[in-house]
């Protein structure tokens, strides 16, 4: 559950096999070298370097205004970098105009040409390549099949639903068989049910075609489920790059921890630390916790220990297991979801702690009630030291 | 809710009023006057008050009571003067419309791409000339284009020419006057369509391999077509029947149909012939409008 290598289960995450980013012998497919984009005094993208490998489904995640869209637009060629280089498959494309890049983009607005039929939209890229008509027709038919739209070939975009427009945009971007497909918030305009379906379709498609995908999104759930790796962006810089499980389980900062779901934060003071472990005393329970950390914080330093709600165990009797940290509290609020329950527990020093517990036992009565005194415990391996 | 499902009497009355108003307007100010003109065009000129023969002869006891004649239309075909001035008008209107489009499109596009506070200023500048009298502006051109005018004066004093150029009372002056007067009517509808264009479409086309001129041809131009057609009609229609500009700026040979019409009505006092000229002019104008309607229906379908 807390595998730091973040190895993905087979079938998830597309055509990229293994973890090429860990292999120093691997050549990156897309390489950003100290890339910056300044608008006046404002640095939208601030000296960013990144290596993306062939077949990856790489996601750039961040809030609005973090610079992720500017970064994508630089990859597509719509924005000229103020500094730095962009390489794709070893070729420097920094100064290549958008119409000559081996890159295609699916726009957030889809940007489907309203005066052309579905078929004409999809064929447009090939027409610009001056391919023979018969070949264009063949590939368009193939692509229509792939995105499951053959029956709508003659329709105009005005007669399509949001999901159908999205498929047209996707087919249009894929037909030139680009080396890299850029997707700007690909699921943002779809409703919840369609999002989930499309998400899996995108992953399957990427798996089939082996094209490297770079996705920009503000939705952490979208990023987690789609990506081989996620780069979290804030104020024009990458604050963490890792697999979905790395950024979830080992967030580098409180900002990132809060971006991906919820986390309980305990204040603590460092007691001792070495290269691999840190021992800290929790303010809450006056107990010591030993947890994995590489920062070598000096004894006496204040730090924050983060624990995800689902890593906490809740019980009415004191657990007695080695390696667990225990604290006490009172159930203040609870929500029953059927498969799991969410508890809000007030700790001894008044801090609210969230606990998400799987409902293992079958019972028509609640196992815990409001105002019950409870013990909260977690394995030290499940906590993470957070920087501000 | 009930008012929507089963509209009350008042609602139905209002709906009727709203729908009837434009039809009533058309009936009163277009169809009835046109019917009168049409009727006169079938009459004979008389030296009388009114100066044409009646359409119905109520006193006749035998034969036809309707005294219609096609003489006026026949005369239009026989005398070359009319054909020449129709053709000349069409030529001047077509070329002026093309010039307005060539000039207006880049201006409209530039305005549509200008960021906001400046955009309103540019739009204001486009309509600013309307704040002074049209006639005054044409007179101003006469002053500028004349033999002793500003332009000749500047050209001579700068040593480019020795003799003043004949600019006033030429076809060139007529084109200048028409383009100058009507270019805002081209810019405004063009701006309205270009402003709505999604710039993502341009980027999407570039992304798919289209060079800038191909983007313009494949994306911008077809999507701007409704604005282009509207602008062209707004320029072509009034330019075709234009009277004041050719009368003031044009020479004797710039005989446009508006001038001919005026002469028939007020100089020759041949109302029936003038009416026939007007009816034919209207037919020439209705053709492009019908074409436009057809195009719109096609693009909607």
Image (spheres, rainbow, N blue to C red):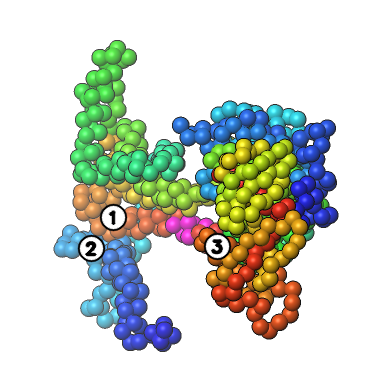
Locate the C terminus of chain A and report the quarter of the image it occupies: top right
| Residue A192 to residue B295: above or below | below
Give the number of the disc on residue B274.
1
Secondary element type, mark 1: helix
Label 1 to label 2: alpha-carbon separation: 11 Å
Determine which quarter of the picture holds residue B48: bottom left
In the displayed structure image, the side of residue B94 where residue B141 appears, left or right: left
Determine which quarter of the picture holds residue A155: bottom right
**Mark closest to the chain's N terminus, 1 or 2:** 2
Judge by depth and name the residue closer to the eye, A39 or B244: A39
| Residue A92 to residue A175: above or below | above
Residue A382 x/y as whole percent: 71, 54
Question: Do the residues marked 1 and 2 share a common chain?
Answer: yes
Judge by depth and name the residue closer to the eye, A261 or B243: A261
Give the number of the disc on residue A348.
3
Q: Tell me, yes or no, whether the two marked residues, 1 and 3, touch with CB atoms within 8 Å.
A: no
């Amino acid at each position: 559950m807390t595998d730091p290598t973040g190895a993905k289960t087979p079938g998830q995450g597309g055509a990229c096999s293994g973890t090429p980013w860990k292999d120093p012998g691997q050549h990156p497919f897309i390489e950003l070298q100290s890339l910056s984009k300044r608008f006046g005094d404002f640095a939208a993208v601030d000296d960013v370097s990144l290596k993306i490998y062939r077949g990856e489904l790489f996601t750039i995640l961040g809030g609005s205004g973090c610079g992720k869209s500017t970064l994508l637009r630089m990859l597509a060629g719509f924005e000229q970098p103020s500094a730095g280089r962009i390489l794709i498959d070893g070729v420097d494309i920094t100064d290549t105009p958008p119409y000559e890049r081996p890159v295609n983009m699916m726009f957030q607005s889809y940007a489907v040409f309203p005066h052309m039929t579905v078929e004409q939209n999809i064929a447009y890229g090939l027409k610009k390549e001056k391919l023979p008509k018969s070949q264009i027709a063949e590939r368009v038919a193939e692509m229509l099949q792939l995105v499951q739209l053959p029956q709508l070939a003659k329709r105009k975009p005005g007669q399509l639903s949001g999901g159908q427009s999205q498929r047209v945009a996707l087919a249009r971007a894929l037909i030139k068989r680009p080396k890299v497909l850029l997707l700007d918030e690909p699921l943002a305009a779809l409703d919840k049910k369609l999002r989930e379906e499309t998400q899996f379709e995108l992953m399957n498609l990427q798996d089939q075609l082996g094209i490297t995908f770079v996705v920009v999104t503000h939705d952490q759930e979208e990023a987690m489920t789609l990506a081989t790796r996620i780069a979290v962006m804030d104020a024009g810089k990458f604050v963490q790059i890792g697999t979905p499980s790395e950024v979830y389980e080992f967030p580098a900062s409180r900002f990132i921890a809060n971006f991906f779901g919820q986390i309980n934060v305990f204040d603590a003071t460092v007691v001792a630390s070495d290269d691999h472990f840190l021992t800290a005393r929790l303010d809450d329970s006056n107990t010591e916790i030993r947890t994995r950390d590489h920062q070598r914080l000096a004894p006496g330093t204040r730090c924050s220990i983060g624990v995800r709600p689902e890593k906490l165990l809740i019980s009415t009797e004191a657990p007695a297991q080695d390696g667990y940290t225990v604290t006490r509290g009172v159930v203040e609020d609870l929500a029953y979801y059927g498969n799991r329950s969410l508890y809000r527990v007030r700790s001894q020093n008044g801090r609210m702690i969230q606990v998400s517990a799987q409902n293992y036992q079958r019972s028509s009565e609640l196992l815990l009630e409001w105002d019950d005194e409870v013990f909260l415990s977690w394995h030290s391996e499940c906590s993470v030291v957070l920087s501000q | 809710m009930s008012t929507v499902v089963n509209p009350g009497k008042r609602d139905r009355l209002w709906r009727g009023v709203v729908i009837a108003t434009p039809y009533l307007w058309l009936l009163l100010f277009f169809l009835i006057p046109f019917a009168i003109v049409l009727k006169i065009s079938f009459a004979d000129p008389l030296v009388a008050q009114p100066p044409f023969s009646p359409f119905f002869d109520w006193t006749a006891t035998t034969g036809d009571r309707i005294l219609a004649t096609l003489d006026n239309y026949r005369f239009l075909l026989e005398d070359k003067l009319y054909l020449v001035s129709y053709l000349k008008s069409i030529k001047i209107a077509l070329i002026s419309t093309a010039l307005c489009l060539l000039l207006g499109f880049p201006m409209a596009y530039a305005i549509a791409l200008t960021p906001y506070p400046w955009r309103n200023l540019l739009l204001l500048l486009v309509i600013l000339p309307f704040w002074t009298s049209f006639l005054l502006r044409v007179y101003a051109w006469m002053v500028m284009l004349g033999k002793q005018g500003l332009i000749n004066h500047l050209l001579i004093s700068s040593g480019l020419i020795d003799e003043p150029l004949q600019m006033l009372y030429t076809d060139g002056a007529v084109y200048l006057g028409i383009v100058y007067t009507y270019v805002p009517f081209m810019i405004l509808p063009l701006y309205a369509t270009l402003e709505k264009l999604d710039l993502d479409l341009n980027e999407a086309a570039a992304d798919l391999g289209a060079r800038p001129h191909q983007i313009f041809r494949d994306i911008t131009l077809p999507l701007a077509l409704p604005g282009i057609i509207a602008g062209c009609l707004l320029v072509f229609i009034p330019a075709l029947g234009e009277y004041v500009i050719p009368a003031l700026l044009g020479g004797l040979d710039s005989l446009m149909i508006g001038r001919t019409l005026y002469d028939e009505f007020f100089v020759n006092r041949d109302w029936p012939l003038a009416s026939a000229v007007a009816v034919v002019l209207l037919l020439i104008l209705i053709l492009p409008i019908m074409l436009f309607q057809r195009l719109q229906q096609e693009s909607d379908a």
